[in-house]
Amino acid sequence: MSDIKLYSYWRSSAAFRVRIALHLKHLRFETIPVNLISQDGGQQHSADYQHVNPQELVPTLIDGGRVIRQSLAIIEYLDESYDGARLLPSTARERARARGLAQLIACDIHPLNNLRVLQYLEHEDNMPQIERERWVQHWIKLGFKAYEDMLVSNPSTGDYSEGDIPSIADCCLVPQVFNAQRFGVDMKAYPEIMRVTANCLKLPEFDAARPERQPDAPKT
Amino acid sequence: MSDIKLYSYWRSSAAFRVRIALHLKHLRFETIPVNLISQDGGQQHSADYQHVNPQELVPTLIDGGRVIRQSLAIIEYLDESYDGARLLPSTARERARARGLAQLIACDIHPLNNLRVLQYLEHEDNMPQIERERWVQHWIKLGFKAYEDMLVSNPSTGDYSEGDIPSIADCCLVPQVFNAQRFGVDMKAYPEIMRVTANCLKLPEFDAARPERQPDAPKT
């Protein structure tokens, strides 16, 4: 029995990635909610949480005495440390492709659009809401166009982004699709992305990780 | 003898990471320069290069018939595929720490400050130069403060970011320090970062990867 805790926020795209990975590995974990939009400016900035994660971002994984930060590093750690479904493919070439796709999202789309950046654009740059939405959509569309190209053009694409087993790439893709839909991006331009996403969401492991299934999600 | 080519730009921070890794692995490679600021709007947007990298970003690594994209995925690929110095540490805990530090830079600092983002802020948002510089400095300072904390607070820090062997974390740190200095960030606030960076730059492998040593760097 593992002793795993995840500092998470229900709507955080990066925490969503790790929740998928934990479910794919069939690991039990305790969710510790960090409310990123609490009245006091966000629990991620509290002194207690700064000690857990000096970046004041979620997610953070606690595994026994270990503190692991950064969603992709956490996913690789879980894959190396625990049996069960493999989150990284079996050859160096396939791993490079899965990691490259994951990083397309985790480096080149998501960081531009997360909460702290939108807060900066609103409060420091006085960017109007309609321009902030255009900013978000711009980086998603640019990234998804490339991701779609890479799915279409590579015979290594299967039921999932890389081959026929869900990987670290899919752990990143599905949360980014949720995020895109939330910001009103027209997903009809990305049929391969939507095919892979639909395949993922048929799996109970992805379903359990959805934002609305989390203990800190607002009750509807 | 390997048949490795690197699409690179002398001042690209992400390409700089991969150049360090190639030198640490003692791999010979051919540099194919991609001029990101050519008169026609940047060679990364040419039809030929789009085929190599649909994201229209550098670096891209060609290894025989393989095309590997995303700097961190390339570094992991090189480490898994070639003998020589290890770019990832030997235990899962240490690898998680090295990857987490690398991703702090590669996900949460650099993507906010690269050329395409500054071009968007200038041309689409009409952000004045002084405000763009403040933007760049903001994300560097926020990230470096956390990186510095993590170096100071963890006994696993050694001559380099993780232990006494240069790793993927240092491949990211040194280019980000160059970038910070170029944008006028006062580095006195980060003595541990500067200690590790100085140790790295004593090594010929880091020195050979410096921007000004590249074939496409302007002659001074």
Image (tube, coloured by chain):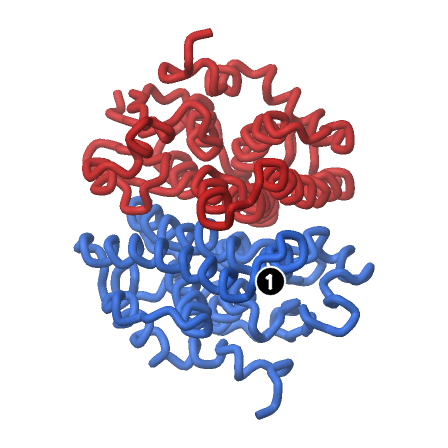
Chain colours: A red, B blue
Q: Quarter-wise, where is residue A37 in the image?
A: top left
Q: Position of residue B214 (x, y in %)?
A: 58, 81
Q: Position of residue B183 (x, y in %)?
A: 45, 70
Q: Quarter holding the C terminus of chain B? A: bottom right
Mark 1 crowdedness (10 Å alpha carbons): few <14, some 14-19, many ≥20? some
In percent of the image, x 55 and y 66: which residue is there? B129
Visible in this render: residue A76?
Answer: yes
Residue reaching furthest to the bottom: B220
Q: Quarter holding the N terminus of chain B? A: bottom right
Q: The numbered mark 1 sits on a residue in which chain?
A: B
Q: Which residue is mark 1?
A: B115
Residue reaching furthest to the right: B47
In percent of the image, x 39 and y 64: which residue is there? B173
Q: How many marks?
A: 1
Side of A141 relative to A10 (left or right):
right
Residue A129 or A30: which is nearer the viewer?
A129
In percent of the image, x 54 and y 29: which residue is there? A175
Residue A13 or B210: which is nearer the viewer?
A13
Side of A47 relative to A43 (left or right):
left
In percent of the image, x 60 and y 15: which residue is there? A202
Residue A38 or A142: which is nearer the viewer?
A38
Q: Quarter-wise, where is residue B43 in the image?
A: bottom right
Q: Is residue B46 above or below residue A162?
A: below
Q: Position of residue B20 (x, y in %)?
A: 47, 70
What is the three-letter code of the residue carrying label 1? Answer: Leu
Visible in this render: residue A98?
Answer: no
Kindly state the secondary structure of the residue where label 1 is placed: helix
Q: Position of residue B131 (x, y in %)?
A: 50, 61
